Image (tube, coloured by chain):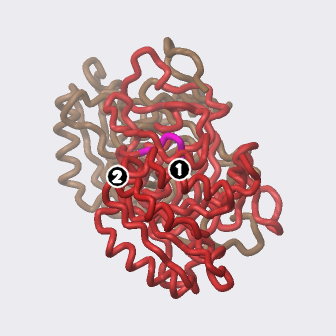
Chain colours: A brown, B red
Amino acid sequence: MSKRTGTLIIIGGREDKEGERAILQEVVRPVAKGGGRKRLVIVTAATTIPQEIADDYRRVFRQLGVGHVDVLDIREREQAHDPALIKKLDDAGVIFFTGGDQLRLTSQLGGTPLFAHMLELHARGTVIAGTSAGAAAVPETMLISGQSEGSLRVSASTLGMAPGLGLLKGVIIDSHFAERGRLGRLLGAVAQNPYNLGIGIDEDTALVVQNERVGRVVGSGAVYVIDGKQLKYSSLSEADPTGVLRMHNLTLHVLGDGDTFDLSTRMPHPPAGASAAAG
Amino acid sequence: MSKRTGTLIIIGGREDKEGERAILQEVVRPVAKGGGRKRLVIVTAATTIPQEIADDYRRVFRQLGVGHVDVLDIREREQAHDPALIKKLDDAGVIFFTGGDQLRLTSQLGGTPLFAHMLELHARGTVIAGTSAGAAAVPETMLISGQSEGSLRVSASTLGMAPGLGLLKGVIIDSHFAERGRLGRLLGAVAQNPYNLGIGIDEDTALVVQNERVGRVVGSGAVYVIDGKQLKYSSLSEADPTGVLRMHNLTLHVLGDGDTFDLSTRMPHPPAGASAAAG
């Protein structure tokens, strides 16, 4: 991948829209004040209430100093083949995927010329940001359903996975993480193939990924990273797995604002100036 | 400690009372069928509805074949000094602490002759079991309050800790774990002193501890063990900690029915016959 690949901003949902708006400030950075002709393009494909959601974000992005806000109101897959809509992306400095349903998002955009163009733009530096469903859709395989607030039952096959947008390899992302008690389902996704890091992002919290490699946490909540590289046992590997999912020897990082995480080494780092180790 | 110390059964709350009752079967084992004169003593000190709770458990324990069920209905601290009540414990094969409020339990029993007698009996083999608040009260320092379903904010001082019953050293226990999204608060308790293992127990799930050393999981949910021994960074150690609690490099085990955990080596083991490692 090119080193000029645009920043990827993965938001756990319900980011602050009224206060300091630290996360949305990150989103608008390339297009606010002095962004020139570059536009911020809101993609509402994931939601069934595109007008309402678009109006809300348009208001906030304008307040944050973005001169040009466009909305790609994709409601049918055919639209993602429309050359006029595709052209509308040409000056996009930032593409912002709203929340909604991640399967709606991928089923409308996956394999279309519109999405291929987004990938080209991203490879040349356009920022892609996504919140809630727009965050969950980022990986190659995405988590689409699974019980919250409970440990995962292997037998209940309650964990739904589907092909994602493929914007970041080697991860599974869940949003609204601590708020909805989603540890169980993220563990389940990691158990399916521990090659993937499980990344659980709280509300009003984002992982800002540069060069597809280093993520920096921004926002008021936490980002949980579950690393199964040292996993010694998973009940999912048994001949006839039943009962609750069991996994022995996972590594867990709880990251907050200013922490960084290197996706290639799988190592977290506290913010510069933080004091030394505890433990 | 004597090797004859009684089994300790730590239950995450809402254990099955109508079906197979795997956990309560463990509880009654020393006193059901052939238990002779040995009694099961229900201690309702934690609850404000002792009659209702006691009646419910009495019914279930009798169904499970316990011939002698007594209730210690402690409502005031003075009662725990009453020699007649203390004597009532003499033939206890099992002492069962109900749910309720762990602080109510420790403030009524802590430092009393009644509780001292319980410890003596336990040291000579009497089983002690506790569910929900009765489980949370087991450690030397117990978790009494803290936000569920959210990551822990260091600044909000929302984490309440208090001296527990001291039945098991080196652990912090939380109940109703996945059901109430309590990862954040258990992480906070571990961060305070990573010497302690954090043990989060789901509903209808128990850790059955032998000789204060090896715990075996029984029940339909999971037991989460958070080990901070390899912790490299905790934001709680900073000079002026603020924001969300951050902790880098924790070890996490998700255990289920049949798994064992050695509290001295901090190592989990799958049930005999389980297949080999994944990852």
- Quadrant location, the N terminus of chain A: top right
Q: Mark 1 or mark 2, which is nearer the start of the sequence?
A: 2
In the drawing, does residue A133 fall left or right of residue B208? left
- Check disc 1 and give the amino acid type: Ala
Could you tell me the amino acid type at mark 2?
Arg
Question: Residue B274, relative to residue A111: is it above or below?
Answer: below
Residue B59 x, y percent position in the rendering:
44, 84
**Chain under numbered label 1:** B
Against A275, residue B211 (above or below) is below
Predominant SS of the magenta segment: strand
Q: Total number of numbered labels? A: 2
Q: Magenta span covers which residues?
A: B139-143
In-image side of A103 versus A25 (left or right): right
Q: Secondary structure at mark 2?
A: helix
Q: Is residue A97 above or below residue B48?
A: above
Residue under pointer 2: B77
Identify the residue position indicated by label 1 in the image: B116
- Residue at (16%, 38%) from the top-left corner? A59
Q: Quadrant of residue B82?
A: bottom left
Chain letter, disc 2 residue: B
Q: Image point 59% across, 20% down: which residue?
A: A277
Callout 1 crowding tier (Cα within 10 Å): few <14, some 14–19, many ≥20: some
- Residue drawn at x 30%, y 45% as measured from the top left: A14
Residue at 63 percent across and 30 percent down: it is A267
Q: Judge whether residue A106 can be spotted in this image.
A: no
Horizontal and vertical percent position of residue A106? 45, 58
Q: Residues within 10 Å of mark 2 (few under 14, many from 20)?
A: some
Q: Quadrant of residue A247?
A: bottom right
Residue A270 vs residue A211, the one in the foreground: A270
Residue B229 shows which numbered tag?
Answer: none
Quarter of the rendering occupied by the C terminus of chain A: top right
